[in-house]
Image (spheres, coloured by chain):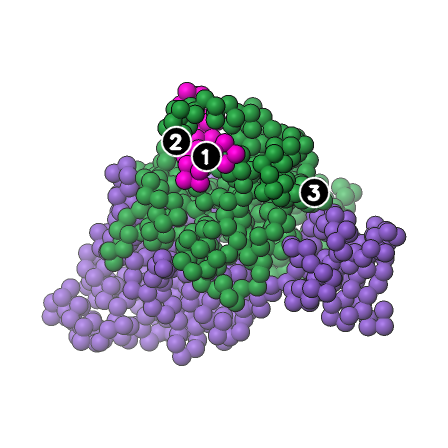
Chain colours: A purple, B green
Amino acid sequence: MFESLPGFREFYPEECSRRNHLFRIFRNVARTFSFREFDAPVLEPLDLYVEKSGEEIVGQLFHFTDKGDRQVALRPELTPSLARMVAARANSLRRPIKWFNVGEHFRYERPQKGRLRAFYQFNADVMGEEDVAADAELIALLVAIFKACGLGANDFRVRLSDRVTWALFLSSLGVSDEQRPSLLDAIDKSERRKPEQTLESIEGAMPGRGEEILSGIEEMKTVSTFDALNERLVSFGEEGERRAGEWAELLQLLESHDAADCIGIDLSIVRGLAYYTGFVYEAFETSVESRALAGGGRYDHLVKKLSGNVDLPAAGFAIGDVTLTDCLDGKKLLPDYIDAPEIFIVAGENERPTALRDVALLRQAGYSSAYTLKRQAFGKQFKEAGRSGAKFAVVYGEQEVLENKVKIKDLSTGAEVSINSSDLLRNLRSLEESGGIAADG
Amino acid sequence: MFESLPGFREFYPEECSRRNHLFRIFRNVARTFSFREFDAPVLEPLDLYVEKSGEEIVGQLFHFTDKGDRQVALRPELTPSLARMVAARANSLRRPIKWFNVGEHFRYERPQKGRLRAFYQFNADVMGEEDVAADAELIALLVAIFKACGLGANDFRVRLSDRVTWALFLSSLGVSDEQRPSLLDAIDKSERRKPEQTLESIEGAMPGRGEEILSGIEEMKTVSTFDALNERLVSFGEEGERRAGEWAELLQLLESHDAADCIGIDLSIVRGLAYYTGFVYEAFETSVESRALAGGGRYDHLVKKLSGNVDLPAAGFAIGDVTLTDCLDGKKLLPDYIDAPEIFIVAGENERPTALRDVALLRQAGYSSAYTLKRQAFGKQFKEAGRSGAKFAVVYGEQEVLENKVKIKDLSTGAEVSINSSDLLRNLRSLEESGGIAADG
């Protein structure tokens, strides 16, 4: 009754702990890269997404008319909101603007393995810096996050490509600026389509030249070394030479950033969205399933398009939580869920007030502390203490409290020590460091 | 252009850092109380809320029909989802179930100071335990969170009341179980209404007895000590005596929990919602504005009502982030926003690869590290380093790198030391502990 909606997840404590584990890694690594966290509304004007992605995006959105007659949508992605926020304060924000977000996003799509209607993304963007060093900084961050998750260079691969290289190549074939988008779209989709379909699309854009252009494209897609790439770029003239220099610089920077071991040149990546303008990349698992883990690239004109007046170079990427969690889970890289307090308090009927005062003290000192809420006999309380998974029980018996003492019991060895109650915190700290109470007391 | 929607917030890094500061306190304190974090979808079937709160709730919701023709709503609160989740696993969850959530909620209301259309709440609930100790545990958690925020016993007050006490009192006046809800509703609203309006409501429910009942109610609302309360409860007979015992127990427990100093008996609190069944409370600032900071209580029958078959006693509360942030901000209790890396790297043109390798190392070691992304002259890099707010610059000059050395410069004193580059991490740790490099080197 009232089941949750398809494609939406309930996070029981175990799943919530896994989710938060990822969030913690995202935040910690982004902080070391000196990125700042920001957030934007999860509900936005529908036009914000239509302006960026065209009318066809509407079919994938949760959108509606609110009670104030506004067309609104649950955010499918963060970039439009980010562009608005940065543009609004473009004059006062120190550059480069290095921001990240961990937030929920929504798409009305058929739920399937690895794809849900509500999902989290880690987004990182650098704005106000056109230098290739900004692209390198982002890719290094992406790689550092995967490594912090426990993935090794053999577990994933960042496939690096370039819209500028594709543009130069297509120009060399006589493809005009106007024809280019439909060809890039055909290249993007060619991975998931039959060759005949790709040929048809290309033929549609460049009548009579489909076969020739397709074979050129297929040949470009085989490029996987810098030397092979360099050779082609140089053949495109001065602009190609300059771009080859930027590729060399990027690869050198990624080497310095200790990220090169999981990066490969792969021109089959072009990214579906029209607004990318430079280096683009997608990260995949290296397993048979080869799930997509992340994607991003440079989008230098989008801020201008969305803000109308602020022109800011920009680049960024997003990691989704659904496939990453599946991937880490399959490799046993998610931490065990620990549902245990550190301390369990056991007290006699009359000693309960004294014991609860110590519970307050222990909690203020940062110890996760529990006790049986209902009054129960000693035996039952010890049973609960054992069941809780706590390392130590702190025991308040009649005699102890009379003498201002408490007992600390190591629930794994069963050994216990009696101490002055005023020494409780100090003793617990020592026991934590020494690893517990030996069975001989 | 494309402004964000009214009542929705953009979190620039400074505001995001304040938000996260609150979230951290919520999570840390809840953990010491041995509560587990969970989460539920932000979009749910509309019926879930209608079933709990009645049709009138729909007027306050963001709701719509999705593309699959489902009536859905952005969650205005968490309790219905929680009840569903707990009921679904009632047999396997260890009791008491102590869960919390930090999440966003949505209401379509007129935005005003302290009230937005999208807001965060901390929710904590104990399920499966009817003992008053569960109520005490929750109120102690509420108080501990406010204290961890830096609020003192003079800054806020938890006003404690009881639906059972009100039911006994109203019964003693001859009010039937059926008439009670409308009287409780009148009492709840009496704080915000003219006396004539309250009188009219009471008169509507109990024709001819309005004046008499209103004066009885007004008299009850003056009760502020346990003795005065006890006297009245005892006059209601055996059930009253039992409830007086439970009040005494609750107050004693709150005393033990070190929470009594900011709690007062105040029967004017009844909480608007119909489903509360026992002790209820609201927390307010003690300032002139007396903003409501939190509210909660026991709701023993709601899980059954929402699940249809699972009967679980339950109690819980919620803290909203909007008024709490305003309150802490007014008292200067929010931390300063620090937008600075710990380390800024400065390197010569040819030394950049070596320097970037150390950036990767520093980041892996947890240091927030930055550098000018674009290649720049030494002077400009030092200017950026100073502007960044970093404590230390690590400097890679031509001569240093040739000798496998680096310089660490204390940007506050201007003093610097030259060290072997392999000793960088060790030296930084020492400098952190000693507080920096003295001006004499």
Q: Is residue B193 magenta?
A: yes
Q: Position of residue B97 (x, y in %)?
A: 56, 58
Q: Residues within 10 Å of mark 1 (few under 14, many from 20)?
A: some
Span colored in magenta: B171-197
Q: Which residue is denoted by mark 2 in the rendering?
A: B205
Between B401 and B267, the one lying in front of the other is B267
Regarding residue B49, the answer to whether it shows in the image is: yes
Regarding residue B345, the answer to whether it shows in the image is: no
Q: Which mark is residue B252?
A: 3
Disc 3 marks a residue whose amino acid type is: Gln
Please report the residue visible at 54 percent of the width from the left and 44 percent of the height from the top: B278
Q: Which residue is denoted by mark 1 in the rendering?
A: B175
Please report the residue visible at 45 percent of the width from the left and 63 percent of the height from the top: B88
Q: Position of residue B19 (x, y in %)?
A: 52, 43
Q: Residues within 10 Å of mark 3 (few under 14, many from 20)?
A: some
Marks 1 and 2, how far apart in space? Answer: 9 Å
Please report the residue visible at 43 percent of the width from the left and 25 percent of the height from the top: B209
Q: Nearer the viewer, mark 3 or mark 2?
A: 2
Q: Are marks 1 and 3 in contact (CB under 8 Å)?
A: no
User: Chain for mark 3?
Assistant: B
Marks 1 and 3, how far apart in space? Answer: 31 Å
Disc 2 marks a residue whose amino acid type is: Ala
Q: Residues within 10 Å of mark 2 (few under 14, many from 20)?
A: some
- Secondary structure at numbered mark 2: helix
